[in-house]
Image: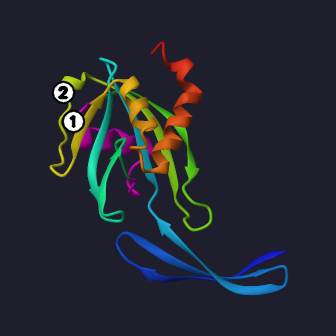
Amino acid sequence: MIQINSRETDYDCRWFKVIKKNVTLNSKTGDYYSVSLYDYITCFVLTEDRKVILVKQYRHAIEDFSIEFPSGLLDTSETPEECAIKEVWEETGLKVQKIYSLGSYYSDVGRLSNRIHYFFAKTDSSLNAKSQEEEITLEILTPEELNEKIGRGEFLFSMQIALITLLNNKMKEWMSL
């Protein structure tokens, strides 16, 4: 039997909350902690000229640059799809022509309560790509060049690998789009 005896915010800041739960599990009672974050979105962007757009930016948590798909935090006033379209525009300067949901999944069920919403977007030409954010640079690759980058271990973010896996499951269906 699992019983949550109490739930309280132990720490609260603009980016996250630490939640303390007192839980009884199989007659043992103890405190357990989790982190409450905003949901994320991440989007595989394929341009009309069949290029993949990646963003490169400095990440303070790892104290290094990371190469990623356009991504962002979902705020409470927008849908995941609206957020994905906004993030693609802000980070790449490209307008989304079509967008497809690949599903929503928890990011880390042992510690985090947020979900990641995955998308595939078709946009206008890569020639129009220019980040609206000065701290982001773009990498514009062919799908083959992306596969080589993955093979070399240049993707550090598991959320990005999950997106590729989800996309591979749909690829045959979408190659005709």
Q: Judge the density around disc 1: few (<14), some (14-19), many (≥20) Cα neighbours within 10 Å.
A: some
Q: Nearer the viewer, residue 18 or 69?
A: 69
Q: Report the quarter where the C terminus lies.
A: top left
Residue type at numbered disc 1: Gly
Could you say where residue 26 lies in the image, as x and y percent from the top left?
84, 79
Query: Can residue 86 be seen?
Result: no
| Residue at the spot of label 1 | 93
Magenta stretch encompasses residue 109: no
Depicted 168 relative to depicted 92: above or below: above
Kindly identify the residue that appears in the image at 52 percent across and 60 percent down: 114
| Residue at the spot of label 2 | 128
User: What segment carries the magenta color?
Assistant: 73-95
Residue found farthest to the front? 152
User: For the residue labelled by badge 2, is the local secondary structure a helix, a strand or a loop?
Assistant: helix
Quadrant in the picture for residue 148: top left
Depicted 102 relative to depicted 176: above or below: below
Q: CA distance from mark 1 to mark 2?
A: 7 Å
Could you say where residue 165 lies in the image, as x and y percent from the top left?
55, 36
Magenta stretch encompasses residue 82: yes
Kindly identify the residue that appears in the image at 26 percent across and 51 percent down: 57
Residue found farthest to the left? 134
Q: How many marks?
A: 2
Horizontally, is 95 left or right of 27 in the view?
left
Q: Contact (CB < 8 A) between labels 1 and 2?
A: yes
Could you say where residue 82 lies in the image, as x and y percent from the top left?
38, 42
Horizontally, is 5 left or right of 16 in the view?
right
